[in-house]
Image (cartoon, rainbow, N blue to C red):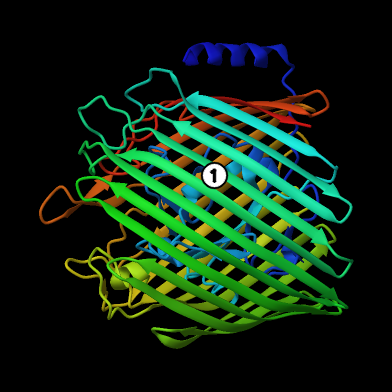
Amino acid sequence: MPYKSYALIALFLCAQFQINAQNVPEESLEEVVVTDSRFKLKRENSGKTVIKISQQEIENNQGRSISELINAKSGIEINGSRSNAGQVLGVYVRGGRNRQVLVLIDGVQVSDPSQTSGSYDFRLLNLNQIESIEIVKGAASTLYGSGAASAVINITTKKAGAKNVNAVFMSTIGTNQSEADQNNNIADFNNSVAVSGTLNKFTYRSAFNQQFAEGLSAAITDANEKDPYSKYGIDVNLGYDFNKAFSLSVYGNFTDINSNFDGGAFFDADNVFKSEQSRVGISSKYKYTNGSINVNAAFSQYDREYISAYPSVFDSKNYVLDLYNKYVVDKTFYTIIGLNVIDNTALFTDKVTFTIVDPYINFVYVSDFGLNINAGGRLSNHSVYGSHFTYNMNPSFTFKSSEKQYTKLFASYSTSFIAPSLSQLYGFYSPNPVLEPEEDKTIEGGVEFKVNNNFRVSALYFNREEQNVISYGFPLYLNVADKVKTKGVELELNSNITDDLCFNANYTFIENRDVIVVRVPKHKMNAQIGYDISKRTFASLNYQYTHDRIVDDFSTSPSSHVVLNAFSLINFHISHSALGNKVRFFAGIDNVLNEDYDDLLGYVSKGRNVRLGFQLTL
């Protein structure tokens, strides 16, 4: 296939149109946050520094992965996001690990019970099917249950369009190469189509997405081999508003991944990884005066297979039910009473399962003199570990200088309960059925200052204390005897310097003096400057600095610790629209300076890569 010819055609088409894209400021309207309370509250009334990734920011990163986008936020490091598309991802938030980060899709917990950490695989998601993302850091088990110890990542998918028929087509092509092999061949393809609409009381949305990438080896080896990656997904959502009070939607999605992988760090092998996810769910809401009754239920099936010299097959499924009542008293007192039920099953040597049944309550108080309180408790009833009570207290006080300017002081104390995964208890590798659950306490405090929706700066300090930390050991997983304490600082700045120029930056410092924290940089910084070249033109330059990281070197016996050097990356993006914003063209260059660095020890990292794409909206 003449891939280079396609690239030249795409460049020619882009040159025929005036560069026209509009950067809509993320806070042109008064910002509302949801995930920290489940109510739509003004940011000034929230006791957290919630990270919001808007639709505009997602559009400015089309052609990239969701892990690359989230990896640019404060307090977060996603190992593997800068590597081969099939690389296993490690999500570390505030020094915590995968199992301490809870992922929600449209408000419903998602997790793979057969994964070692019981976590959710971000590779199953496609960025162009996502409307927005909210990230709340810190313990949040009160609202979201086991696993919400260091962060909750709430992903909202796109909804049906307002017209009878809406269609969106998107296609992206790009290179997929390392720093040492700059061949500039087109080797990364992303395509998607979505059709949606509203017919009186009925809404529908159906989407298909496909990705294929080759050109990169998974491991660093002398062999000149490539490990291809392919994925396709289907999403369907149907909704009906029976009347002004009652609405119901059903949804389903399927994702299929096929990826080649090597035998480990610095070790070539012709292995294959296959993964399938099937998920169906229902969501309903009944509104009454000052409140609503909400029901979210979902069933997920996960099938993974590793074809190698050491083959393995993982099958798992889970059921999730979240039933809760929301009630608002005079727009000052917001309450939630709910019941969350999760049933996890996985097939290892035998079929194993556990069930969690959690009643919970939470309230938010918003005063007219500046005091805000978010507090609640949850009784987690685990079929293996019995009952555990978790709670949170999150007060804040807002000093308003004017309607568009405030200074907010906030603090929180939260606890979390993290049950061992089915894999850690009964899986194929080093299982230990007598593991104790992890317990987490988080204290944080900070300040946020905002002016006129054009300038916001925040600073916070956090301190996490973990007990019974689960660590991999041979021949068994073990609970670490001593407490593990992690502390850090997060700084964030968002500013619209002029109507045409914006600047955003964040910095994170994480430290643990008691134990060696692997794969987590002590210092990390991200910065972005964006400029409206014209009313319909936007360009941005992104910078990321990642400090030294300590990692395990399993090529030695016994394993040892080595240091991966610090590195800096610069990314460029430009987009433009035409034909009344129905057509949008975009282009990007990642790792502009072709930096030589290590994302993971012994695995290939991405060098300079270029992508081109367009989106057509009808």
Element at badge 1? helix
**Front-lying residue, 407 or 561:** 561
The residue under the point 40% across, 50% down is 89
Residue 206 drawn at (x, y percent)? 68, 45
Which amino acid, mark 1? Answer: Leu
Q: Quadrant of residue 405?
A: bottom right
Residue 521 appears left or right of 199: left
Residue 417 drawn at (x, y percent)? 45, 78
State whether residue 564 is above or below residue 48: above
How many circles with numbers are drawn on the protein? 1
Dot 1: few (<14), some (14–19), or many (≥20) neighbours within 10 Å?
some
**Front-lying residue, 496 or 273:** 273
Is residue 128 visible in the rendered image? The answer is yes
The residue under the point 25% across, 65% down is 472
Is residue 146 visible in the rendered image? The answer is no
Q: Disc 1 marks which residue?
A: 69
Residue 326 drawn at (x, y percent)? 75, 77
The residue under the point 55% across, 44% down is 233
